[in-house]
Amino acid sequence: MSTQTVNGQLLYLSRADVEAAGLGVGAMIALLETAFREKGRGRVEMPPKPGIHPKLDSFLHAMPAYIPAMRAAGIKWVGGYPENQARGLPYITGLLVLNDVDTGLPYAVMDCTWITAYRTAAASALSAKYLARPDSRTVGILACGVQGRTHVEALAGVFPVTRVFAYDIRREVQDRFVADMRARFGFEVVGVDGPKAAVVESDLVVTSGPILKHPMPSIPPGWLRPGAFASAVDFDSYWSPAALAEFDKVTTDDLAQFQYYRTVGYFQQTPEPCADLGEIVAGLKPGREHANERTMAMNLGLALDDMAVAPDVFRLANEKGLGTWLPL
Ligand SMILES: NC(=O)c1ccc[n+]([C@@H]2O[C@H](COP(=O)([O-])OP(=O)(O)OC[C@H]3O[C@@H](n4cnc5c(N)ncnc54)[C@H](O)[C@@H]3O)[C@@H](O)[C@H]2O)c1
């Protein structure tokens, strides 16, 4: 495609259209691997995300990125409101705009809820591919919301998962998660009574509760076993400073954004990340080096993730005749 704009129109994709486009999580992991390799080689443009914060622990973030090798350019405008669950609304909502790299014109606007749900889990799975033991079989999910679900799916695509331990502060959410995951996957899914039981026997641990500016972490040192990998998509909200200090390697997805978050009050007691995912995927820094290392991905969620996958969502949706064309 020489230019991505179609006859002065843009394609609007609702959440249902984005889902129906059918981009699989395995394909997303592969797209992210390309994007992070480009990032590691310094070939993407992605300024730290500016944000506004209408309510405590809420955010509205502007997330632009350009990945030349993927002809991907655009921005996500995404909100995160922890109290939305009580209103029957998703925690994460928003819109994503794709721009033609040659003309700058927008050619697609799409709901970003589904993309955010899956690309975050795909990024964790990509981190785990480089940082976890390949024979990891047990998964601990702490918080069984949208991210808990997509993480099970993404990790099961990369590792020979046999058992999932699930914990949510809300029992009914945990029970529904256990029932749904059992019905969907062939492995054992066990609901547990507290965070400890979801951590101690797990090779892969995902914490996906609310991001708190003033965290009250409940995972102490000594719970995570040697050789395990953890992904904290809720930043440092779940892991105590002493537990974070136990990791042999803490990594992130973007060092500049990690430093930026420090300046606005997050990660005050988190160890300095030893690498970002781009450096690891590009082979500039090592991933896992020993079977007994404890490794962590503290991924912040990048515009790069969204721009790596959204053009393929557009392409698939367009091929299937989904969405609504709108005049510019
Ligand atoms: N880093 C990233 O790239 C990225 C991207 C998207 C979302 N997130 C974050 O992931 C987190 C989860 O998002 P989501 O869309 O799954 O939200 P969600 O509302 O669907 O799920 C959150 C779940 O956490 C549970 N919970 C709350 N406190 C808990 C606790 N102390 N222990 C166990 N469970 C608890 C809630 O009952 C709920 O089921 C949020 O913090 C969100 O900001 C991060």
Image (tube, grey):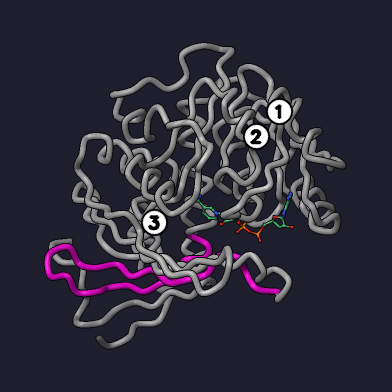
Mark 3 and mark 1 lie on one chain; the one further toward the N terminus is 1
Q: Tell me: is circle 1 under 8 Å from ligand 1.
A: no
Q: Quadrant of residue 50?
A: bottom left
Q: Which residue is mark 3?
A: 306
Type of amino acid under label 1 = Ser
Which quarter of the figure is the N terminus placed in? bottom left
Residue at figure coordinates x 32%, y 72% from the top left: 108
In reply to whether residue 167 is colored magenta, the answer given is no
Residue at figure coordinates x 29%, y 78% from the top left: 10
Q: Nearer the viewer, residue 157 or 176?
A: 176
Which quarter of the figure is the C terminus placed in? bottom left
Type of amino acid under label 2 = Val
When the figure is inspected, residue 114 is found, relative to residue 272, above or below; the finding is below
Could you tell me if the residues under marks 3 and 1 are in contact, i.e. CB atoms within 8 Å? Answer: no
Estimate the spatial distance between the alpha carbons at disc 3 and disc 1, rounded to whole Å.
Answer: 29 Å
Relative placement, left or right, of 235 versus 66 is right
When the figure is inspected, residue 123 is found, relative to residue 112, above or below; the finding is above
Estimate the spatial distance between the alpha carbons at disc 1 and disc 2, rounded to whole Å.
Answer: 6 Å
Q: Quadrant of residue 295?
A: top right
Q: Which residue is mark 1?
A: 202
Relative placement, left or right, of 45 versus 20 is left
Could you tell me if the residues under marks 1 and 2 are in contact, i.e. CB atoms within 8 Å? Answer: yes
- Could you say whether the residue bearing mark 2 is in a helix, strand or loop? strand
Relative placement, left or right, of 98 versus 17 is left
**Structural crowding at the residue carrying mark 3, measured as other residues with C-alpha within 10 Å and reported as few (<14), some (14–19) or many (≥20):** many
- Which numbered tag is attached to residue 205? 2
Q: What is the span of residues highlighted in magenta in the rendered image?
A: 88-115
Residue at figure coordinates x 56%, y 54% from the top left: 213
